[in-house]
Amino acid sequence: MTSASQPARWLDPTMHRQMWLLAWPMILSNITVPLLGLVDTAVIGHLPDPRFLGGVAIGASLFSILYWGFGFLRMGTTGHCAQAYGAGDYNQVRLLLAQSLLIAAGLGTLLILLQQPLIGIGLWLMDPSPEVLEQAQLYSQIRIYSAPAVLANYAILGWFLGLQNSKVPLALLVCANLINILLDLLLVLGLGWGVEGVALATLCADYAALALGLWLALQRLKPLPGQLQTERLTQWSHYRQLLQSNRYLLVRTLILLLSFAFFTAQGAQQGDVVLSANAVLLNFLLLISHGLDGFAHAIEALCGRFHGAGQRQQFLNACRSALLWSVATALAFSAFFGLAGPWLIRMLTDIPAVIATAEIYLPWLIAMPLTGVWSYLLDGIFIGANWFREMQNTMLLSALGVYLPVWYLSQPLGNHGLWLALTLLLLARGLSGGWVFIRNNR
């Protein structure tokens, strides 16, 4: 390898063009997800009592575990579908969509059937104040019925991204979030339904997105060669590869979401004001993570395609392109929140105590893009390459070896210690994932 060839791969205009064609719709669609949370927070945050904001924060955190815990339906589908697409195996492309939708329907129905113990145990573990608990229960009893739609939407989003199509996920998420926002304004501010209105708006939006997603998937299947081998849908052996990788993704995702639930629960122990302030800042963190995930999702699709086609040099070039744009975006996020953070906080709530508390901990949020960008990028690479076990192991190491010990030792710092632990969790994931990437490509 000559020194002259190295810069050309970093500055490959064709690869950067492919990256942006996939990334910009995913960035926009990902940002709509936390923007929805920001609207929920803004609508509830302007009600006169912080218990409403706390109830939505606790309820939303609970469903992050219940729903996002099954995010393997998107990630696993993307990785396997991208590799099948790169290899030209269109029968497998069709089969993966059908399998993922069947798994989503079964798991979603199971969540509804088990709603009482799941919601009860989840809220008990978070241990909010009695006033906040009441509001969180009202939210949860409605939101649980969106489970089949949410999980099926994960599968559809992952399938389209595996086919190198990021515009359909953008259309689906924009549709869902616009419906959700409009219903938020109507049901909460217009009809005064409070927390129940927020939950019902999300429920309706999830099923609307599912209907649109199924229709678009049928349209995409029509020009594809091959056919669905229906006999494989009833044979357990044909699910083995998908379920094996999903097992690692499930463990990884549950640990990540439990870490955020633990963060919310520990904030709740410090009072409703700290809980509400953390909820405001976590909405900003979701905006950051979803924005950076746009490049992670693009690299999932590109890495999967190049890996499936056996094009190792293209695989590495795609990783370099994603690295450049991810770091640039992280710097932009840090600058943005450094300048506009106090103004954004006031947009979400007009409760003086919550505003003052959120501003105290804002510097942690400003640092988050630069400490977390590495883990988001590497997750995308690992999904595309189907390094699912490595994703699980780096998460286990970071949560058990860094996050919990740092939280335990920094308890005298109060909420600052909690934010320190979360920051180091993201950094540890990036460092351990980077070591795995170097080892696997040595």
Image (cartoon, rainbow, N blue to C red):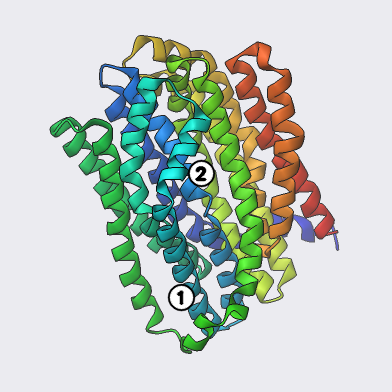
Quickly name the residue at label 1.
98
Res 346 → quadrant: top left
Q: Position of residue 399 (x, y in %)?
A: 70, 37
Tally the numbered discs: 2
Position of residue 298 in the picture relative to residue 244 (left or right)? left
Q: What residue type is disc 2 on?
A: Ile
Res 344 → quadrant: top left
Residue at 81 percent of width and 59 percent of height: 440
Q: Position of residue 184 (x, y in %)?
A: 24, 38
Residue at 65 percent of width and 33 percent of height: 371
- Marks 1 and 2: CB-CB under 8 Å? no
Q: Few, some or many C-alpha atoms within 10 Å of disc 1 (few <14, some 14-19, many ≥20)?
A: some
Please, is residue 98 above or below residue 212 in the view? below
Which quadrant: the N terminus?
A: bottom right
Q: What residue type is disc 1 on?
A: Ala
Quickly name the residue at label 2.
65
| Extreme residue toward the left, this view | 191
Position of residue 136 in the picture relative to residue 366 (left or right)? left
Q: Dot 2 lies on which element? A: helix
| Extreme residue toward the front, this view | 117
Which quadrant: the C terminus?
A: bottom right
Q: Is residue 12 visible?
A: no
Res 308 → quadrant: bottom right
Q: Position of residue 391 (x, y in %)?
A: 69, 52
Residue at 29 percent of width and 65 percent of height: 211
Residue at 56 percent of width and 59 percent of height: 75
